[in-house]
Image: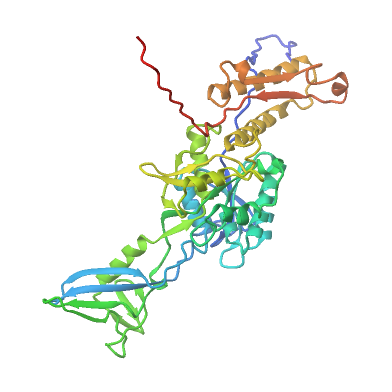
Amino acid sequence: MRNLSTPGVTVEEITTFPPSIAPVATAIPAFIGYTERAAEADTTPLTGVSRRITSLLEYEALYGRSSPEALSVIARKRVGANGALIGVSVNFDTAPPPVPASLMYFALQHYFANGGGPCYIHSIGAFGGAVSQGDFTGAITALEAVDEVTLLVFPDATRVAQNSIHGNIVLAALQSCASTQDRFAIADVRNAQPGGTVTAQDVANNFRNAVGASSVDLLKYGAAYFPYLRTSIPRITDDASVTVVAASELITVADDGTETVTPLVPDSGDPTTGTDVTLDADVLQGDGASIPGETAVVNAIRVFLSTAFVTLPPSAAVAGVYARVDRTRGVHKAPANVGVFNVIGPAVPITDDLNGALNADPTAGKSVNVIRNFTGKGTLVWGARTLAGNDQENRYVPVRRFLNFAEESIEKAIGAFVFEPNSANTWVRVRTMIENFLLNQWRAGALVGAKPEQAFDVKVGLNQTMTADDILNGLMVVRIGVAIVRPAEFIVLEFQQLQQQG
């Protein structure tokens, strides 16, 4: 109010712009899993705490990395008659499991490599122990208090002992997303690698049946991806964890081509026999004795180990793809037909028949999106369906995620009108604010229609969305209709030969 009791000049600023809606973030995942450690720099514990990070370096500082794997290799060194090195070949004596025992650090590497940005880490304890369903469901519930989170990712859940337990964790994530209505779950198909879940029937038995939900109200809040990915992320090792087995050989090639084979690593007691040793500095060391001069062997082993890559569940990489597509194209763009980085290829080859069987589930609608390799294109995400694949309104990932985005953005902005007069002036301001927001989305390509009025409709007012009794009861009802763009999942080209004219 003006104070005109004192003579002088009064300056007033008049607001000319209507209230606006700030778009919320759309790709802020929360990763749930077991970590090497969990503590701030001042040793404040982070176990059971949702902590925001922005880089892999920050993750390493707070949560560590992954324990070095115990690996055993066999080396064969070939030298000429004069002792000149011909070459060194290295291979695993016992091949390690393709999927590492601890997944979180590798998953975060894959996430950031694929375009991921800020995210939350919810450590549920140190890795190495039993994987508990309760750890994951408790974390999912705790994350409901973190408003910024928009994606739930839990690759470590694939390490549970049974498919039914994994299904329960996925179901808990879907229930949480449905409760908050502001987030989306990215699920893995457990053990989708050779020797595990590889066929359409396997997926039906091990994943679709394990996720007991059948309600569209739950299934629309998540998507599943298949299979695991053979990455270009190397295993973590150190010299003390690498064993060079006694079967390693020194092959001396005479001038006439005759080969003499002796143990590459003799023990201290008998130079004609070998013993397992560990890789240490530039020597092969074992039984308290060092055998110097094997730098070439050590280097060959290290080069070999640098190309020993891990296989990972796809959810972390897909979360990175979501973030990249949201940033470059918008949340309305399907995160599909997009390359996956740091990948050699899918762990299971995808045929058209398998792709079709996973994409459509006539029984329960639980569509599974595949990641497959295309000659000349690389490895692409090749599906954009939610688990509610039979529901036309919520079939596609970008449709569901755009609704989450629009609903939360509008909800946060309209909170400013609580306790404002429930009158025509307020209704006009609310309608204008929402229409301006949706107009921007239409211009960005998120809504279908040649004109704005064909793309969205906002109604609020007496005898439109409210009765006189509603107003007496303090209700202001806003009805919003949007025509969300849907992906062109199937493109059909029809050719017809025309007869020559004239």
**With 160 as the anchor, is 141 left or right in this view?**
right
Q: Which of 52 and 320 is in front in this view?
A: 320
Give coordinates of residue 455: x percent, y percent. Answer: 61, 20
Q: Which of 335 and 501 is in front in this view?
A: 501
Q: Can residue 39 be seen in this view?
A: no
Residue that lies at the very extreme toward the bottom in this rendered image:
269
Q: In which quarter of the image is the N terminus?
A: top right
Give coordinates of residue 82: x percent, y percent. Answer: 12, 76
Q: Looking at the image, is 304 positioned above or below residue 220?
A: below
Name the residue rendered at 42%, 46% in the picture.
373
Q: Looking at the image, is 264 positioned above or below residue 173?
A: below
Residue that lies at the very extreme toward the left in this rendered image:
255
Q: Looking at the image, is 215 positioned above or below residue 65?
A: above
Q: Looking at the image, is 431 positioned above or below residue 66?
A: above
Q: Nearer the viewer, residue 299 or 380?
A: 380
Name the residue rendered at 37%, 80% in the picture.
276
Here the colouring is rainbow
Give coordinates of residue 262: x percent, y percent. Answer: 25, 82
Q: How many labels does the image show?
A: 0
Q: Can residue 203 be seen in this view?
A: yes
**With 427 as the anchor, is 38 left or right in this view?**
left
- Could you say which quadrant of the image residue 131 lies in? bottom right
Give coordinates of residue 383: x percent, y percent. Answer: 52, 41
Q: Quadrant of the C terminus?
A: top left
Name the residue rendered at 44%, 59% in the picture.
310
